[in-house]
Amino acid sequence: MKTFSEMKLEIDVPIVIADRQGFVIYVNDCFTSVFGWSITEIHGQMITVIIPDGFHAPHHLGFSRFLTTEKSTILNHPLRLVGITKDGREIEAEHLIMAEKHQGEWIFMAMVRPL
């Protein structure tokens, strides 16, 4: 499996990275093109800004569970989910979510390939 550094080099698929608190710390140019956010607008936002409202609670629960147990059933497996653009449109996409420790802290990356 590729490292986050290698994945950041991907230019043809939207990529978003969030810290252990769920704040967006990186997006690539493809993400900004597809989702409509500029890098400065999305940086520092909660990752839930791109997740439909009805999925916020399950997202928080899974996020908390992973940080407590460091075990997950959804990481590294393609998931068919919906993402929300800046203007509120829903985009059906295949998400591949990964976690990696950096300096002892978990960070999370999603490749969000529109379908």
Image (cartoon, rainbow, N blue to C red):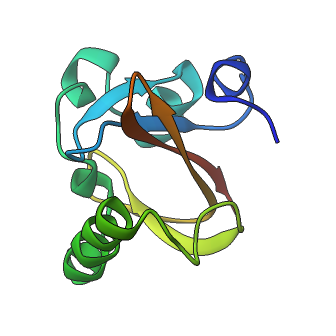
Most extreme residue toward the right is 1
In the picture, the quarter occupied by the N terminus is: top right
Vertical arrangement, residue 29 with respect to residue 59, above or below: above
Vertical arrangement, residue 108 with respect to residue 70, above or below: above
Vertical arrangement, residue 93 with respect to residue 22, above or below: below
Position of 13 with respect to 100 (left or right) is: right
Q: Residue at x 17, y 28 (%)?
A: 44
Please state the total of marks drawn on the protein image.
Answer: 0
Q: Position of residue 64 (x, y in %)?
A: 25, 67
Q: Position of residue 56 (x, y in %)?
A: 22, 73
Vertical arrangement, residue 107 with respect to residue 98, above or below: above
Q: Residue at x 51, y 29 (%)?
A: 33
Position of 114 with respect to 99 (left or right) is: right
Q: Position of residue 111 (x, y in %)?
A: 62, 46
Position of 79 with respect to 69 (left or right) is: right
In terms of image quadrants, where is residue 97? bottom right
Q: Position of residue 11 (x, y in %)?
A: 71, 22
Q: Residue at x 59, y 37 (%)?
A: 14
In terms of image quadrants, where is residue 43? top left
In the picture, the quarter occupied by the C terminus is: bottom right
Q: Residue at x 29, y 82 (%)?
A: 58
The residue nearer to you, when weighing 101 against 28, is 101
The residue nearer to you, when weighing 69 against 72, is 69
Position of 36 with respect to 42 (left or right) is: right
In terms of image quadrants, where is residue 50? bottom left
The residue nearer to you, when weighing 56 against 52, is 56
